[in-house]
Amino acid sequence: MEEQSILIQTFGNYPLIRIFGFFMYSRDFDYPITEIAKNADVNFQTLKKLWPKLEQDKIVVSTRTMAGSALYKINTGNLVVKS
């Protein structure tokens, strides 16, 4: 059994929490949405449903485009993220 992060242990094993957990541990790098889904262990279709709200609330920001794909990272300037 894989050891769960403190974030998942505290808030539960839900897709949004796994996405936050991935970003918190990888906050210095940017990723395409497909890699975020893979690394957060979240179904891509589930991530696509959650993604608009994350962008709207400026939890994640697009950093650049590489090979036609937008790359994203967590917005460390956002007050919610800081908390």
Image (cartoon, helix red, strand yellow):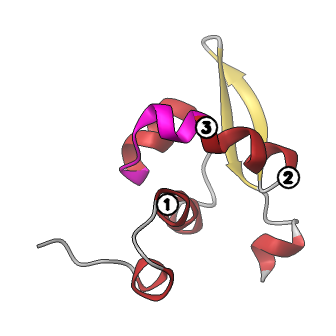
> Which callout, 3 or 2, points at the residue further toward the start of the chain?
3
Q: Which residue appears farthest toward the left when viewing the image?
A: 1
Q: Which residues are magenta?
A: 40-48
Q: Name the secondary structure under disc 2.
A: loop
Mark 2 Cα-neighbour bin, 10 Å: few <14, some 14–19, many ≥20: some
Task: Measuring from the top left, give residue 60's x and y in whole percent.
Answer: 75, 50
Query: What amino acid type is highlighted by mark number 1?
Result: Phe
Q: Which residue is mark 2?
A: 58
Disc 2 and disc 1: Cα gap in Å?
17 Å
Tell me the element at label 3: helix
Q: Is residue 83 or residue 65 the one in the foreground?
A: 83
Task: Tell me, yes or no, if residue 76 can be seen here.
Answer: yes
User: Is the residue 9 above or below the residue 17 in the image?
Assistant: below
Q: Position of residue 7 (x, y in %)?
A: 49, 80
Dot 1, crowdedness within 10 Å: few (<14), some or many (≥20)?
some
Per the rendering, the mark at residue 49 is 3
Give the amino acid type for the residue marked by disc 3 in the picture: Lys
Q: Quadrant of the N terminus?
A: bottom left
